[in-house]
Image (tube, rainbow, N blue to C red):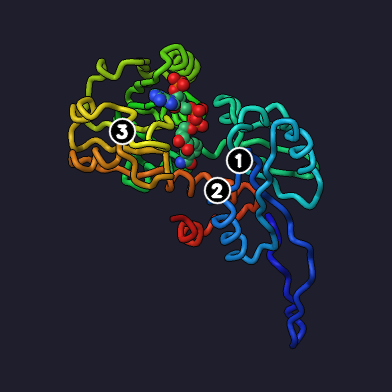
Amino acid sequence: MVAPMMMDKNSTIQTMVTISPLQVGLIGDPVAHSFSPGMQQAAFDALGIAAHYELWHTPAHALLERVRALCDERYLGANVTIPHKEAVLALMDKVDPLATRIGAVNTIVHHDGYLHGYNTDAPGLLYALHEQGFGMKQHDGTISLKGLSAVLLGAGGAARGAAFALAGAHVAQLIIVNRSLKRAQHLAAKVQQTYSGPIFSLNDPQFLLPRPASLIINATSVGMHDEQMPLPVEILARFGSDTFVYDMIYNPIQTQLLCQARIMGMHGENGLSMLLHQGALAFTLWTGEPAPLDVMRSKLP
Ligand code: NDP
C-alpha cells in the first residue's frame, strides 16, 4: 500500500512532509493522445497519494531500458499500450497467470526491485459489461456471463484479451469472426485449451446465426478511422433487440456499428468504460487502494 502524504497530528501547525512523488506512466508508441494521464493523476490526487503519472513515448529499441528502469524505488510501475503489450511479457520477473494465457501485459507493478506483469484489459471488459447489467458478480469479485452467447469481432491483440475474458466468464458459446480465418482459428485453439464450451471461428459473417441473449463485441479497428462497419448491417439486423453491442473503440465515441445497433433498438456502449475499468484495476495493483471510479470517469470524454 502506498502511504498518503503524511501530516504531523501533534503539531498545531500541520507540516507537510516533503517527499518526492513516486512515478508511474504509460509506455507505448504513440502515447500522446492517451486519456490515462488525466484519469490516473486525478485518482492519485483524490486519494492524496504523492505520485505523478507521465507519458513515456517508447520506440521498440528503447523498450528494454525503459522497462528495467522501473526497478528503481522511485517507480510504482507502468501501463503498457500498443505496440509493446506482447514484448514486455518476456521482460517481467513474474507474470500473472491470466496475462500468461493471453500472452500480453498491460500493467507493470514494481515490488522491491522486481517487476510483476498483469493484464487488466480482460477483467476491465467484464466490469464494463457488468456495469451495463450483464453477468453476475461472484464471491471472489469475478464476473460470470453464464447463459450468454458471445460474438467476438476480431482476433488481434484486444480480441485475444476479450476472448480469454469471455471464456473465463463461462459464456455459453463463443463465436470469433475475423477477416483472417487463420488468426481466428489460432485464437480459438488457444482459448479452447482452458474453455470447455463451444467455440466457432469464421471469416465470413454471412454464416453467423443469431442466438437469443447475445453479446456482440467489436475488437477490430474497423470504425476507428472511417464510418465502416465490422459487421454488415444486414447481418446485424438478424439479431434481436435483446442483443447488446459493445464497441471497444472509444475514439470516435459513436461508431457506425453503435449507431446502427441503436437504430435497430439494441443497446450499445463504447470502449470508454473498458478503458476506465482497466485503469482502475491497474491503480489498485499499484497502490493497494480501491480506485475512485467516479473521479476517474469524470476525466474521460
Ligand atoms: P490489432 O491491430 O491487434 O487488431 C486489429 C483487428 O482488426 C484484427 O482482428 C484485424 O483483422 C481487424 N481489422 C483491421 N482492419 C480491418 C478491416 N479493414 N476489415 C476487417 N478487419 C480488420 O489491434 P488491437 O487489437 O490492439 O485493437 C483493436 C481495437 O480495439 C482498436 O480500435 C483499439 O483502439 C481498441 N482497444 C480498446 C481498448 C479499450 O480499453 N477500450 C483496449 C485495447 C484496444 P486481421 O486479423 O484480419 O488483420
Q: Quadrant of residue 113?
A: top right
The residue tagged with tag 2: helix, strand or loop?
A: loop
Question: Which amino acid, mark 2?
Answer: His
Residue in the foreground of this view, choosing between 279 and 238: 238
**Of the residues tagged 1 and 3, which is closer to the observer?**
1
Residue found 41% across the figure and 13% down from its top = 181
Residue found 75% across the figure and 86% down from its top = 13
Residue 106 locus on image (x, y percent): 60, 37
Q: Is label 1 in contact with label 3 (beta carbons under 8 Å)?
A: no
N-term mark: 1 or 3: 1
Q: Is residue 112 left or right of residue 152?
A: right
Residue 79 locus on image (x, y percent): 62, 43
Quarter holding the C terminus is: bottom left
Classify 10 Å Cα crowding around label 2: few (below 14), some (14-19), many (20 and above): few
**Which numbered dot is residue 215?**
3
**Of the residues tagged 3 and 2, which is closer to the observer?**
2
Q: Which residue of the protein is positioned furthest toward the bottom in this rendering? A: 12
